[in-house]
Image (cartoon, helix red, strand yellow):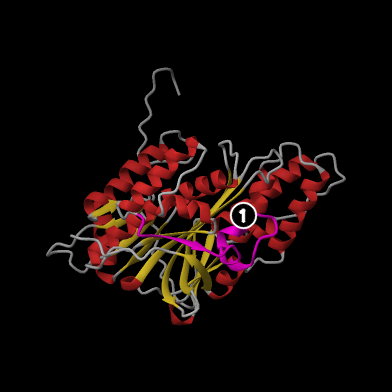
């Protein structure tokens, strides 16, 4: 083009730096203004319909907006409203695909399928077929290591939580040794043989639902003597058993296995930092769930945190203290949330039943595996506090 030419961009295109901003402001604004939706506290791309009015009393929906596609949980009234608003706004869109037992959905790198009794299965879309074992004898093994680790980590982050720890550890190796490559290959081999392994989602009674956060931390178990932190969030229905156990049945909502960036000098420190990470995500999801329950006229979903360390449990519910004064900031913040009932309950559980163990150890217990296989887990509870009902 000659010097001084101005280009008028009439629609966002890949490769243009401003395309993402244009898409976000245009499409997100359309959802909020035209479809009467609000951004959730968990993710700016997750939107929920606002309180009903006389004109949209039956137009309920939850939307997850992605760059190439949206996924909606909606009723027919909202579907027709959305099509009408798209036509008025003159937005071009792909035709809707409705998830049914014989029709699957591809979204955000995953495949969503439906079986009988409204059960949903979330599996990898095909990335597992590209995974290859790292050849330890080649000169470019470091490059192979990075490529295959990345492929495995993507699948682990979406639908295979069992692989999260090994791939998080692999990401910490700047110059992978023979042992690092052997360990990674073992996990990659498992993923190659478990292409259909994923997460299953079953119906949960929202009236009696609870959000459980299982947290854990391993002290100085990484190669650089840093600690590994892990947590998992589950939306479940709970039943209490007579032998000091409780059984939960529900779904995995979120999970994480990360290296602690702060210096840890004790097991208590690593456990506290793990709980802080889990609580941060837990409170974000709890407030998002509150948007939904308020819209439906239901009570808020309680947030319950479970730890297998008695000293941490004692610090929070029995006003215990620690000699590591730098930990008191985190302890006081958690204790304040507990007193304000942002955390409904803190439980001390048996370590053999803690599913977060999988995110912090190379040889963990099998609690997470049992839950993923059956969507059900029985946990031995060692201590809890019966709190009086909140006054209004």
Please name whichever residue, 388 or 43, is drawn nearer the observer in this view of the structure.
388
| Residue at the (29%, 59%) spot, across then down | 290
Please name whichever residue, 238 or 375, is drawn nearer the observer in this view of the structure.
238
Q: Position of residue 174 (x, y in %)?
A: 71, 37
Q: Is 152 on the left or on the right of 386, as rendered? A: right
Q: Position of residue 227 (x, y in %)?
A: 62, 44
Task: Name the quadrant containing residue 355.
Answer: bottom right
Q: Position of residue 246 (x, y in %)?
A: 47, 73
Q: Which residue is mark 1?
A: 164
Visible residue check, residue 155: no
Label count reads: 1
Assign the C terminus to one quadrant of the image.
Answer: bottom left
- Magenta-colored stretch includes residue 184: no
Assign the N terminus to one quadrant of the image.
Answer: top left
Q: Residues within 10 Å of mark 1 (few under 14, many from 20)?
A: many
Part of the protein shown in magenta: 343-367
- Magenta-colored stretch includes residue 363: yes
Please name whichever residue, 9 or 54, is drawn nearer the observer in this view of the structure.
54
| Residue at the (76%, 57%) spot, across then down | 186
């Amino acid at each position: 083009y000659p010097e001084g030419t101005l280009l008028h961009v009439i629609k966002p295109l890949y490769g243009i730096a401003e395309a993402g901003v244009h898409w976000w402001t245009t499409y997100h604004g359309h959802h909020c203004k035209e479809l009467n939706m609000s951004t959730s506290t968990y993710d700016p791309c997750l939107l929920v319909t606002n309180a009903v009015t006389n004109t949209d009393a039956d137009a309920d929906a939850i939307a997850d907006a992605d760059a190439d596609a949206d996924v909606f949980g909606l009723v027919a009234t909202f579907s027709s409203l959305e099509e009408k608003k798209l036509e008025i706004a003159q937005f071009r869109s792909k035709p809707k695909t409705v998830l049914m037992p014989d029709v699957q959905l591809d979204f955000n790198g995953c495949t969503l399928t439906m079986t009988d009794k409204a059960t949903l299965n979330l599996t990898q879309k095909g990335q597992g077929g590209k995974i290859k074992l790292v050849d330890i004898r080649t000169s470019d093994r470091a490059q192979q290591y990075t490529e295959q680790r990345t492929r495995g980590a993507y699948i682990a982050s979406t639908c295979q939580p069992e692989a999260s720890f090994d791939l998080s550890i692999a990401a910490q190796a700047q110059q992978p040794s023979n042992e690092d490559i052997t360990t990674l290959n073992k996990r990659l081999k498992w993923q190659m043989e478990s292409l259909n392994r994923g997460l299953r989602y079953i119906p949960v009674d929202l009236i009696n639902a609870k959000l459980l956060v299982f947290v854990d931390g391993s002290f100085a178990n990484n190669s650089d003597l840093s600690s590994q932190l892990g947590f998992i969030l589950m939306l479940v229905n709970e039943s209490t058993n007579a032998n000091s156990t409780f059984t939960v049945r529900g779904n995995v909502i979120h999970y994480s296995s990360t290296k602690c960036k702060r210096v840890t000098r004790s097991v208590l420190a690593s456990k506290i930092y793990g709980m802080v990470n889990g609580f941060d995500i837990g409170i974000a999801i709890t407030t998002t769930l509150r948007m939904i329950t308020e819209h439906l006229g239901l009570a808020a979903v309680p947030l319950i945190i479970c730890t297998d360390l008695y000293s941490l449990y004692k610090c929070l519910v029995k006003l215990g203290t620690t000699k590591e004064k730098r930990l008191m900031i985190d302890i006081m913040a958690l204790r304040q949330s507990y007193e304000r009932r942002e955390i409904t309950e803190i439980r001390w559980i048996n370590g053999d039943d803690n599913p977060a163990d999988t995110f912090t150890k190379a040889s963990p217990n099998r609690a997470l595996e049992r839950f993923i296989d059956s969507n059900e887990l029985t946990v031995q509870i060692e201590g809890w506090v019966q709190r009086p009902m909140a006054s209004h």
